Amino acid sequence: MANSVYVSYSWSAEDDSHIVEKLKKAWQDRGIEFVELKIDKQAINYGDSIRAFMDELTKADSVILVLSEAYFKSPNCMYELRGISANKNFQERVSPIVLRGTPLYDPLVWVELLAYWENKEAGLDAKLKTIRGTNVESIQKTLNDYADFRRLLAGQLAMLADMNALTQDIHVDTDFEDLLNRIQPKKTKTPFPLERYRKPDAEFLRMVRSEIKRILVGRINLEKALLAEVNVELSDKTGDLVEDICTADFDVAITRILRPATKSCLSGLPANSADWKNTWEDAKSLLAWLSLLLVSPDWIAQQENRGRVPGFSFEIMVKTPSAVEIVSCRYRQMQPKLRAEPGKNEVKGRGRIEHPKWETGWSDGRSDEPELNKLLLEIWLCIFPESKRSSLSADDIEDLNEALKLFEETKDSHYYVPVEEGDDCPLGRQDFREKLLDKLPAITLISIKTASGPPLLVISERRVMAVIRQFLTMGNLE
C-alpha cells in the first residue's frame, strides 16, 4: 500500500457534515504511522495547482470517497472520480462514506443526476455556439468533460450502490473503525496468475444482468422501446424486462427486439446529436453484454477445472472472429469490444492482434529472434499506435507488459493473439510460444481448435456473426 491515503469530497458537503474533520481526528487517535491522510485544503499551498493535486489523487492506491448529492454534481469531484475509475482495482482502492440524505440507492435519482450533466452539457453547448469558435479550447474541453461525467455516472452509480458503504452515522459512532481497518497496510497481492481473481461464473452472470439493468435505468427511451418489442415478440414473459431479454433466444433478442427498439429510438433523435450518440453507445453495450450469455457455463467450468494450458491462456473451439471475442471475454469476465470493419463481412474484437505473415517467411526455429521482435512490435503498435517504433527496448517491453496487465485488471480491454490450428508460423510451435511468453507474460495467446465440445450455446457461429454484424452496421452507423 502507498504511504498516502487521499480523500475525495465536496467542500460544500463538508461544511455541513464536518465528516472529513472527524475522520482526521479518528485517524490521529488511532495513531496510524507511516501513512499520511492527504486532504486537499491542507496539502495544497497558496498558489499551488489544484488540478495537479487531483491528478495525484486519481492515481493513489487508496482513496476515501465521501459521497453526497453535491459530490455527484461537482465538476472537480467528477474529475477525480473519473480518474480513479480509469485506474486499476477500483473497488479495492476506494473506501466510500455515504453522507446522510444521499440518494445513492434510488435509481430515480440516478436518472436525475444523469439529466443534470446532460443539461449542463446542453446549456454550455448552446452558449458556446453564440460566440466565435476560436480560442475556446478550454471551454470545449469542459463541454467534453460534462459528457464524460454523464457517461461516468451511468456506469459508476450502480457499482457504488452495490458496495457495502456504511453510513455517516455508523462511521462517526464507531470512530471509523471499519474504514480504518480496511485501509491499514496490507500484503501486496501477486498480480499473476490473473485467473486467481476471477469471480465465480454465476456471480459474473448476475453482474451481467446488473449491467444491463444499469444501462436501461439511464436510458429510459430505450427501455420503453424494448418493453414494447418484448410485449409483441415474446409470448412467455416474466414481467421483468431484463430477465425476458436475457432468457430469450439470442437471434430473437437482437434481431426482433433490440434492433427495432434501437432503430425506433435513433429515428426520433437528431442525427449525430449527443442523445443520438449516447443512445447508440448504450445499445451497443446491451448487444455486447447479451452476447456473453451465448457461452456455455459448463464450458467455462471445464476451463476452470483444467487450469492454464501450457503455452496458452486458454483454448477455444470456435471459427469466427466474433465468437473468439465473445468466448474469450466471457472467460476474462469483461464486456466484448465488438466491431464490424468497413468493407469486410467479419465482426472482430478491438483487442484482436493479427500476427503478420511476412514475405521473408518464418524461420525454422534456428533463429527466431527477428520474427519474435517483429511480433512484439506488432503488439506494441496495436496498444500504443501513437508511439511509433522501429524496434523495442527493454523499457518498451516492460511498458508493454504493465499496460497489458492493467487492461486485464481493470477489464477495460482484452488484447490477445489468436493462433489457429495448423497455422504455418512459429506460434504453431511450443518453443516459440514459450519465447514470446517469457518476453511478454501478460499477453493472451488463444489456441483456436476444431475439436468437439463447442463453448457456444448455438449451432451456427455464422448466424451469430450475421446477427451481430446486421446490428452494428444498422443504418451505416458503424
Image (cartoon, helix red, strand yellow):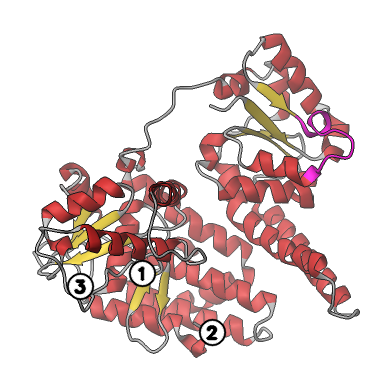
The percent coordinates of residue 156 (x first, y second) are 60, 50
In the picture, the disc for residue 248 is: 1
Q: Please, what secondary structure does the residue beneath circle 1 have?
A: loop
Frontmost residue, 440 versus 307: 440
The residue positioned 69% from the left and 85% from the top of the image is 270
- Distance from disc 1 to disc 2, alpha carbons, whole Å, reads 20 Å
The percent coordinates of residue 234 (x first, y second) are 40, 75
Q: Residues within 10 Å of mark 1 (few under 14, many from 20)?
A: some
Q: In the picture shown, does residue 459 fall above or below 295?
A: below
Q: Residues within 10 Å of mark 2 (few under 14, many from 20)?
A: some
Q: Which residue is mark 2?
A: 263
Residue 162 is a magenta residue: no
Left or right of residue 248: residue 139: right
Residue 46 is a magenta residue: yes
The residue positioned 68% from the left and 75% from the top of the image is 274
Q: Which residue is mark 3?
A: 319
Classify residue 199 by image quadrant.
Answer: top left
1 or 2: tag closer to the N-terminus: 1
Q: Which residues are magenta?
A: 39-50
Left or right of residue 447: residue 164: right
Q: Residues within 10 Å of mark 3 (few under 14, many from 20)?
A: some
CB contact under 8 Å: marks 1 and 2: no
- Tell me the kind of residue under disc 1: Ala
CB contact under 8 Å: marks 2 and 3: no
The residue positioned 37% from the left and 61% from the top of the image is 391
